[in-house]
Amino acid sequence: MLRARPVLRLARLTTMLCAALALGAPAAAHAAAPAVNIDAPSDQRVDQALATGAKIVRLFVNWNQLEPNGPGLPSTDPGAASALSQYDTAIRRLNAGGAKPMFVVLGTPSWASGSTDDLVPPTDPQTYANFFGKFVRHTQSVGSVAAYEVWNEEDAAEFWHGPNPGAAAYAPMLRAAYAAAKPVAGDAAILVGPTTGNNASFVQGLYDLGLKGSFDGVAVHTDTACLSLGPDFYYREDPGARLGQYTFLGYRAIRDVMVANNDPGPRIWMTEMGWSSTNGGPTSCQRGTGAGNRPSGVSEATQASFLTQAYGCLARDPYVVVGAWFTLSDARRYTPDEINHYGLLDVSGAPKPSYAAFRQVAAAGGGAAGPCGDFTPPTVSFISPAPNQGFTGSLLIQVTATDGADPGVTPAGLNRISYLVDGQPAFYRFSDLPAVGDTVSLNWLRAADLSDGLHTISAEATDKLGNVARTTVTVMKGAQYVGNVSYATAFEIASAKGRPSCRGRLCSLKGRLTGPANQSLSGRVRIEWQLLVRMRVKSHVKGRKRYVMKWVTFHKGGSSAMKPFTFTQRLKRGGKWRVHVYYEGAPPLTASKTPWITLSA
């Protein structure tokens, strides 16, 4: 967790809390063991931690305090000897209560770094490794320990004051510390120091540097960046990409890195998790990606609710060994103030609602798995075009999409549908999506510019959490692919009784051209207005007259075939008129026309 810079004293460092592997109590299948952080190895804090039901308790250990004057553990320095004795007592007291400690080891003495700043890493990583190995050997001789973390949040400048914090700077320390400690660690795990948030890039960097086999697990901290939304919320770095670093569920991205590096054995230890109970005030978040535009915390009731939900999330993923709540008790010493309110107890020692929630989860050994996060991508399918459809002009693209969700999870909702042509993003995309299951349509005019031959059209549906689904259809551009296939078109006239509506000589005709659902309507609809200028008798047949009529076109017009039309015309003069609309066709669509409609003006 990011905090104000610690002072050099043990009390200041041990105030920063984390969690570890809960052993010794029956747990729900695969549930992460509930653990708690405490700020000092005092009898009072140890007893308070045991009262929560936690079977693992996380403590900070300051190398600077235990070897202040040079190598040697135990030290002859009275202060160092007293500090080590406190840890020994804490181990015995926790073990007697059915719990184990987990230690995070940091804080460089000046003789090893040349600096009075104990967060400057040692000049020679082997000096840290030598102390780390001795500390592990000593504590194993005292009692049972769950795990040891190699430094704390070494991926960021908050706790790593050397140049360029990152995998390259940290790797030599981790490699040396693991080699020194593993032979004497017994059943305890040696962990990659917790990353700030879920820093998958940092962990990948360790693999790239050949650190596979130099750790038993990876620790992460999710109480960073002022989380104010529930554990089921997440964001992605890009749609379809890995989960964001500063999101609770981002530990799954760490797991993905492990699996990708063929290293499923190392497991994830969430050694700090939590939500601050500042209730969103008095200032906004001042840390991480939410700085300046996010509430600094949640209410006490919401903190308790999120705690229960978070352990339900962890129980879904058996590779998460521990979930350690940060922290046992609120404080009054940090800047910004948000960091002071993550506790299960308030500053007076009174339990907050989260205390009872934690005890319930701990009593259930981590609890049962619960719904957590919408990771189900949308469904998307083409209505048009049909597979292997031939075309020559524009192309009607129609898709339907629905957002999916895991059982018991509310779908996040669709965000957009994007299109790709031959695998490349098209020059348009939709963001104004319809209701679930409705159809999104586009008559793509630029399809006429494609070269003759086969092409792929892909539709990608993305939900609001960045889950992506894609479907693809192959189409064939060119008259040779249309062949003998043809599709009929027809007109629907919307005016009253299928006739133009007229007021005097001002007439209007409304309607639309229709065609098959899987074909675009390209080209133009045309209209022709004719006046009867002469009529004469041509012949008599069985006593009935036959007339010859002469019609003259006086008015014409046109409109796109893709949309409904309204033709309005002021007729040139009174008389008997007739009108019709027609479509000349565009392969594979056939031509069509309406009968002549007569009217008087």
Image (cartoon, helix red, strand yellow):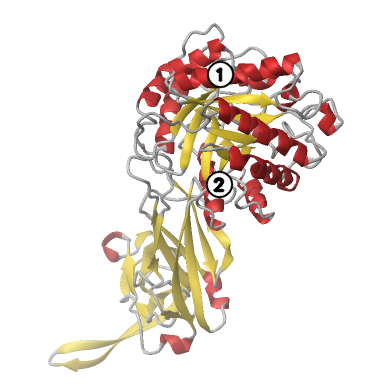
| Residue at horizontal 66 percent and vertical 20 percent from the top | 84
| Residue at horizontal 41 percent and vertical 53 percent from the top | 378
Seen as rendered, the residue at the extreme left is 542
Q: Which mark is residue 240?
A: none
Q: Quadrant of the N terminus?
A: top right
What percent of the width, then of the height, locates residue 304? 44, 22
Provide the secondary structure element on which disc 2 rests. Answer: helix
Q: Where 196 falls versus 179 (above or below)?
A: above
What percent of the width, then of the height, locates residue 468? 48, 55
Seen in the image, is 494 located left or right of residue 165?
left
Judge the density around disc 1: few (<14), some (14-19), many (≥20) Cα neighbours within 10 Å.
many
Res. 350 visible in picture = yes
Q: Nearer the viewer, residue 37 or 247?
A: 37
| Residue at horizontal 12 percent and vertical 92 percent from the top | 542
Q: Where 375 falls versus 508 (above or below)?
A: above
Judge the density around disc 2: few (<14), some (14-19), many (≥20) Cα neighbours within 10 Å.
many
Q: Are marks 1 and 2 in contact (CB under 8 Å)?
A: no
Res. 344 visible in picture = no
User: Dot 1 corresponds to which residue?
Assistant: 90
Under mark 1, the amino acid is Ala
Seen as rendered, the residue at the extreme right is 114
| Residue at horizontal 57 percent and vertical 57 percent from the top | 261
Q: Where 207 falls versus 387 (above or below)?
A: above
Q: Nearer the viewer, mark 1 or mark 2?
A: 1
Cα distance between the residues tagged 1 and 2: 32 Å
What percent of the width, then of the height, locates residue 571? 44, 67
What percent of the width, then of the height, locates residue 373? 43, 41
Under mark 2, the amino acid is Ile
Provide the secondary structure element on which disc 1 rests. Answer: helix
Identify the mark nearer the N-term, 1 or 2: 1
Q: Where 217 falls versus 81 (above or below)?
A: below
Q: Which mark is residue 254?
A: 2
